[in-house]
Image: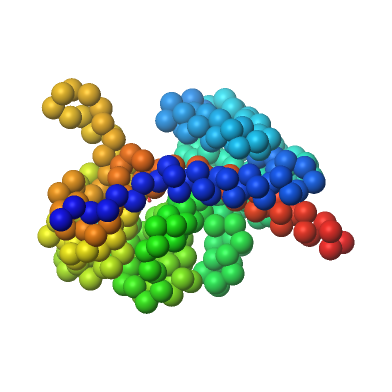
């Protein structure tokens, strides 16, 4: 048996087409502002990718690439200006930030209505209360991927390996809101395999290459590999691999590839969130 491949790009394209159609019904194209601090090559490459994709689907976007030495006060001043600008619909601050800037202070400063990453405590609270508004992009993208591929979620046993604020926790809330029975495992979980073997839907978001081996997977389960790990292969070249061992394809019923699975969904969901933010802001103004 070989698992059905749950490819990301066609699903991301469907999500983007829907976002672009909704954007065209608004009085102005939604406007996303991306802020990066410092010169970490991976961060800058993510920012370029997000900006390029935004342009491809017709969203207005601006990148503020700030110097590594930027102070927290300077960054907060910029966020305040963007919060007050009615022409800015979405604000994304690329993480991680340099050590002199407290991440929480920055995430709390973004207007929750423009918080397209969904990290503001108000949006986190709404998500856990079952009233999601703007939700973190990777988990929301995973839910869209499951829905698009017709994977039943209601009543399913879902196990997430990883409890980060970026992936594991918000995904747990989304799966719970969609009526799955959810378990979140982490590095202190005892006998991880006995937990993961219960899963109809198994999500690996640990950042550990090959962590999930075939013996840890229930036959026929849907396995979502969120991990993006750069490893050196015997050919001496760097390769991207997930958290799921390739042999899992022989046990799982369906599996997302790395690369080309969850990754493309994340950027598409960011742009969908930008359109959603613009819609909510437009509706709020129309109500005044
Ligand atoms: P974090 O490092 O913030 O969190 C990792 C989580 O996995 C932690 O909760 C940790 O447990 C748990 N964990 C680590 N090792 C083990 C283990 N051996 N057994 C059980 N649990 C373990 O990572 P992120 O959530 O930010 O990212 C996870 C992975 O997903 C990374 O590879 C990242 O690159 C990738 N990623 C991919 C995205 C995409 O678009 N495809 C987007 C975001 C992330 P504990 O809390 O106890 O330390």
Q: Is residue 80 above or below residue 55?
A: below
| Residue at the extreme right of the image, as rendered | 288
Q: Is residue 215 above or below residue 67?
A: below
Q: Is residue 21 left or right of residue 137?
A: right
Q: Is residue 288 left or right of residue 214?
A: right
Quick one: 202 or 192, which is closer to the camera?
202
Q: Is residue 143 left or right of residue 278?
A: left
| Residue at the extreme top of the image, as rendered | 236
- Residue at 61% over, 37% down: 57
Quadrant of residue 197 within the rendered picture: bottom left
Residue 54 pos. (x, y %): 59, 36
Q: Could one spot residue 151 in this view of the protein? A: yes
Question: Quick one: quadrant of the C terminus?
Answer: bottom right
- Residue at 77% over, 42% down: 28
Question: Quick one: quadrant of the N terminus?
Answer: bottom left
- Residue at 51% over, 48% down: 14
Quick one: 135 or 119, which is closer to the camera?
135
Residue 234 pos. (x, y %): 13, 27
Residue 110 pos. (x, y %): 65, 49
Colouring mode (rainbow / by chain / secondary structure / one colour): rainbow
Quick one: 207 or 246, which is closer to the camera?
246
- Residue at 36% over, 41% down: 260
Q: Is residue 200 left or right of residue 70?
A: left
Q: Is residue 279 above or below residue 181?
A: above
């Amino acid at each position: 048996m070989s698992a059905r491949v749950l490819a990301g790009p066609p699903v991301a394209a469907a999500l983007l087409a829907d976002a672009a159609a909704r954007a065209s019904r608004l009085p102005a194209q939604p406007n996303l502002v991306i802020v990066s601090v410092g010169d970490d090559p991976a961060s800058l490459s993510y920012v370029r990718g997000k900006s390029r994709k935004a342009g491809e689907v017709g969203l207005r976007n601006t990148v503020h690439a700030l110097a590594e030495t930027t102070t927290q006060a300077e960054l907060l001043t910029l966020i305040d200006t963007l919060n007050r600008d009615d022409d800015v619909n979405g604000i994304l601050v690329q993480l991680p930030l340099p050590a002199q800037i407290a991440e929480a202070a920055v995430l709390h400063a973004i207007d929750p209505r423009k918080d397209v990453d969904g990290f503001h405590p108000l949006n986190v609270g709404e998500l856990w209360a079952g009233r999601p508004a703007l939700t973190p992009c990777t988990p929301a993208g995973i839910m869209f991927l499951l829905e698009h591929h017709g994977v039943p979620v209601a009543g399913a046993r879902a196990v997430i390996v990883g409890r980060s604020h970026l992936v594991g926790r918000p995904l747990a809330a989304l799966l719970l809101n969609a009526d799955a029975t959810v378990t979140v495992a982490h590095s202190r979980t005892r006998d991880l395999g006995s937990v993961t073997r219960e899963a109809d839907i198994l999500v690996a978001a640990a950042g550990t290459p090959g962590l999930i081996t075939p013996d840890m997977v229930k036959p026929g389960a849907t396995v979502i590999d969120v991990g993006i790990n750069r490893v050196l292969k015997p050919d001496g070249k760097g390769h991207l691999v997930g958290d799921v061992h390739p042999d899992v394809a022989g046990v799982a019923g369906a599996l997302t590839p790395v690369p080309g699975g969850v990754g493309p969904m994340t950027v598409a969901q960011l742009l969908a969130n930008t359109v959603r933010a613009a819609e909510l802001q437009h509706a709020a103004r129309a109500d005044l």
